[in-house]
């Protein structure tokens, strides 16, 4: 007599897709100010060489600003928790939470003990003094928590305060001066690279902007995220990744429109493969 288990090895998570939009418009008055005359007479295609040049320069400038602005705001949205608006994506602040035993993410309730696999490791208030500092201890604990549950992190990002605290703790506790064979008279005061278990610790300058915009209880500048790219991904809907849009001119405005749209979600398939820690 033998028995067979009916295992449910995959918990189904469900993420609602969200959309993002940004755009710009040019009205005929502004184009005339730039030496471009637009009207509805004739078959079109009668622009002078000067008008073509001015229009090309104007569109290139506006399109570049549109793309850069879209990418900046979209990157910020990927870090937030999705509560900023009804159309905001669920970002890292929700997926890799400072309070991982609360809330529902992807339809999975993290407060239930049976869903412990959905909880990331989190620890705040770490110290960096040379006598009582515990930052290195908890970085090791966070690393092991991630490795134990889904492979090692392949991306570590942190804010300025965390990076300064970690660097100063390491230097003051185990300080040394490394020479790279350039010259014995050369002293380099900057930090070329910070790594942990061979993974570079990347400084994220956006964390300062997020603090200024949202003033969270635990500042972003004090945080450090251990992320595993196998288990957390940005997933645009096929054919909907940064699409250029050209809406028709409105009947009551002599104005022309250009836009960018994106639709998709940030998804996670294993919560305990990630960690977030912060310094005091």
Image (cartoon, rainbow, N blue to C red):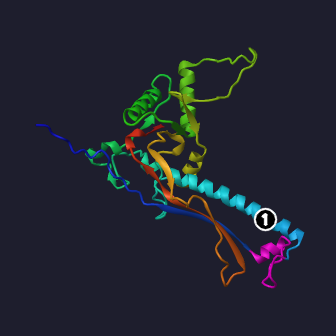
Residue at position x 58%, y 37% in the image: 202
Q: Position of residue 134 (x, y in %)?
A: 44, 28
* Element assignment for label 1: helix
Judged from this view, the residue extending furthest toward the right is 49
Q: Position of residue 72 (x, y in %)?
A: 62, 54
- Image quarter in which the N terminus is found: top left
Q: Position of residue 66 (x, y in %)?
A: 67, 61
Foreground: 56 or 93? 56
Q: How many marks?
A: 1
Q: Main secondary structure of the magenta part?
A: loop
Q: Which residue is mark 1?
A: 58
Q: Is residue 80 visible?
A: yes
At a point 26% along the width and 45% down the height, the residue shown is 114
Lateral position of residue 196 relative to residue 25, left or right = left
Which residue in the rendered view is the most extreme toward the top? 184
Camera sees residue 215: no
Q: Residues within 10 Å of mark 1 (few under 14, many from 20)?
A: some
- The x and y percentages for residue 70 are 62, 58
| Residue stretch rendered in magenta on the structure | 27-45
**Is 208 above or below relative to 186?**
below
Left of 47 or right of it: where is 162?
Answer: left
Q: Nearer the viewer, residue 259 or 165?
A: 259
Task: Give yes or no for residue 28 being in the magenta stretch.
Answer: yes
For the point 72% across and 80% down, the residue is: 254
């Amino acid at each position: 007599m033998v028995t067979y288990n009916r295992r449910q090895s995959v918990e189904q998570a469900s993420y609602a897709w969200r959309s993002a939009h940004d755009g710009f418009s040019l009205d005929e008055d502004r184009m005339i100010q730039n030496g471009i005359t637009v009207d509805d007479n004739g078959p079109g295609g009668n622009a002078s060489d000067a008008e073509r040049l001015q229009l090309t320069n104007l569109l290139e400038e506006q399109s570049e600003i549109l793309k850069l602005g879209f990418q900046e705001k979209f990157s910020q949205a990927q870090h937030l928790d999705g509560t900023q608006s009804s159309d905001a994506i669920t970002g890292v602040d929700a997926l890799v939470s400072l309070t991982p035993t609360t809330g529902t993410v992807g339809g999975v309730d993290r407060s239930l003990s049976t869903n412990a696999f959905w909880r990331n490791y989190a620890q705040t208030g770490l110290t960096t003094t040379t006598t009582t500092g515990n930052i290195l201890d908890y970085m090791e604990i966070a690393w092991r928590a991630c490795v134990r549950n889904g492979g090692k992190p392949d991306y570590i990002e942190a804010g300025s305060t965390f990076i300064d605290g970690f660097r100063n703790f390491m230097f003051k506790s185990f300080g040394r001066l490394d020479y790279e064979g350039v010259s014995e008279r050369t002293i380099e005061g900057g930090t070329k690279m910070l790594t942990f278990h061979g993974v570079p610790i990347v400084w994220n300058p956006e964390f300062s902007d997020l603090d200024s915009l949202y003033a969270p209880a635990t500042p972003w500048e004090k945080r450090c995220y251990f992320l595993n790219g196998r288990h957390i991904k940005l997933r645009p809907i096929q054919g909907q990744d940064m699409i250029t849009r050209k809406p028709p001119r409105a009947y009551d405005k002599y104005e022309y429109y250009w836009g960018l749209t994106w639709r998709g979600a940030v998804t996670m398939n294993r919560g305990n493969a990630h960690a977030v820690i912060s310094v005091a």
